Amino acid sequence: LDWDVVIVGSGPAGCSTALNLAKRAPALARRTLILERDQHPRHKLCGGGLVRDADVLLANLGLDLREVPHVDASWAHFHFRGHGARIKLSDIAFHIVRRAELDAWLAMHVRRRGVTIQEQTRVERLSSVEGGVEIQTDRGPVRARAVVGADGSKSIVRRSVCPDSRGNVARLLELLTPDAPIALPRDEAFFEFSCRDRGVQGYFWSFPTRVEGRPMRSWGVYDSRILSGAPHAALKSVCRDALEERGLRLGDHHFEAHPLRWFDAEQPMSIPHVILAGDALGADAVLGEGISIALGYGAIAADALADAFERSDLSFSTYRDRVLKSRLGRALVRRTRGARLLYGIEGGLRRRLFWWCVGPAMQGYVKRYVFNWATSDRA
Ligand SMILES: Cc1cc2nc3c(=O)[nH]c(=O)nc-3n(C[C@H](O)[C@H](O)[C@H](O)COP(=O)(O)OP(=O)(O)OC[C@H]3O[C@@H](n4cnc5c(N)ncnc54)[C@H](O)[C@@H]3O)c2cc1C
């Protein structure tokens, strides 16, 4: 076969798998190829919010996020009609990067550590061959003994692992505006959950950001769609109204929409010779946070690959257990359950009461049970 490992996608999940492989099994990393549809730096629709777990995981790889242009949100406000809490995870709430810059930086480090990335190559389908997988691309076939599907929420690789998986997909809408006044200090972020009353199983957000050195704001709506059978909310009109309340017009700005797959513990996660990572397997259902999670999946996937090649057993029959028993897997299970509970509260009054009661305890809860699952290798 051409390669021992082919990773499909060079976003945070694919790059993290490669970087962790270079750390854990350098010889295997040199026999690893990443196939990427686009070319870095490439556009990726994303708010770019990076929580402390990402700092920890990057530090474990010897990488320092300070090399990537970013701004910091000093506080994050989680609110429902004036009730809720403001939260910090360390001395700040979270960093905000532009994904084109973060992902190009990750890909540069992947190459420096000896993993080959072939850009402008779209994977079209996978088929089984003796001892591995044949990957059909728009530039011809590639054969590998193991494949990692790190190709995002619309993953092609996922179709081989679970051909009839449907649902579990959130919708997001996002736009950027020049820095605009908000009712908070400019370096703060907010997550406003009152759009739940209009059917959104999520929130409206605003973060500070910086594009080519210019201060901007990122705005958007996240709708988890986690409650099966509930009617879909009109995201565009929710977003338009939330912007108008703040003196902005949706029509004056370019907006984009994208799906996001969230984590479901019941789903298949691998088949012989193929494993999934990142959004292809599922991100956080409560907030749609997926960058630190994709970085975390990379460490799990690399361990699974290294063990599989050491034991010459590429069945990946224990991959699901490995994911579910990891600190990341346990956090994701809690978050999917949490999203069902949070967005399942019926009635405006009950929601208000919930936010009024839990608001004061929220900082402690999210620091302990939602974030901070990543552990430092130095600890
Ligand atoms: C609007 C929006 C806002 C978001 N905001 C945040 C946020 O603020 N913070 C946060 O943590 N998360 C956020 N997320 C989620 C975050 O973007 C994802 O969880 C994260 O990008 C997952 O990384 P990944 O590597 O799994 O997938 P991706 O980043 O999607 O990378 C997949 C890679 O695979 C490549 N690829 C896809 N198909 C193929 C193919 N067929 N062949 C070859 N290559 C292929 C793509 O080009 C891409 O480079 C947001 C998502 C959206 C949609």
Image (cartoon, grey):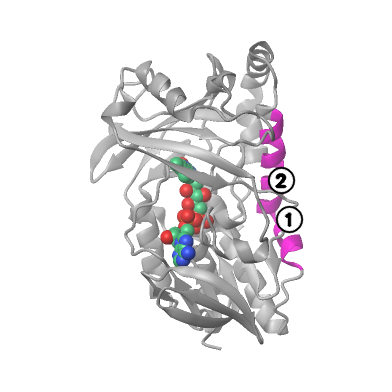
Q: Residues within 10 Å of mark 1 (few under 14, many from 20)?
A: some
| Tag 1 and tag 2, C-beta contact below 8 Å | yes
Query: Which residue: 67% across, 54% down?
Result: 165
Is the magenta region chiefly helix, strand or loop?
helix
Q: Which residue is mark 2?
A: 333
The residue at 26%/28% (across/down) is 252
Label 2, ligand 1: CB separation under 8 Å? no
Q: Position of residue 339 (x, y in %)?
A: 66, 34
- Check if residue 37 falls in the magenta segment: no
- Residue 70 visible, this orientation: yes
Under mark 1, the amino acid is: Leu
Q: Residue at x 36, y 30 (%)?
A: 187
Report which residue position mark 1 lands on: 324
Where does the image place residue 274, in percent across and percent down from the top left?
64, 71
Give the mark nearest the N terminus, 1 or 2: 1
Q: Range of the magenta residues?
A: 318-341
Q: Position of residue 68 (x, y in %)?
A: 34, 53
Q: Is residue 10 visible?
A: no
Q: Amino acid at mark 2?
A: Val
Cα distance in 3D space between marks 1 and 2: 8 Å
- Number of the label disc, if any, that sits on residue 84: none
Q: Is residue 126 above or below residue 59?
A: below
Q: Position of residue 51 (x, y in %)?
A: 50, 44
Q: How many marks?
A: 2
Inspect the magenta stretch and tell me whether residue 324 lies in it.
yes
- Foreground pick, 185 / 294: 294
Asked if residue 275 is positioned above or below residue 330 in the image, the reply reads: below
Q: Within 10 Å of the Cα at label 2, are there few (<14), some (14-19), or many (20+) other Cα atoms? A: some
Quadrant for the N terminus in the image: bottom right
Dot 2: element: helix
Q: Secondary structure at mark 1?
A: helix
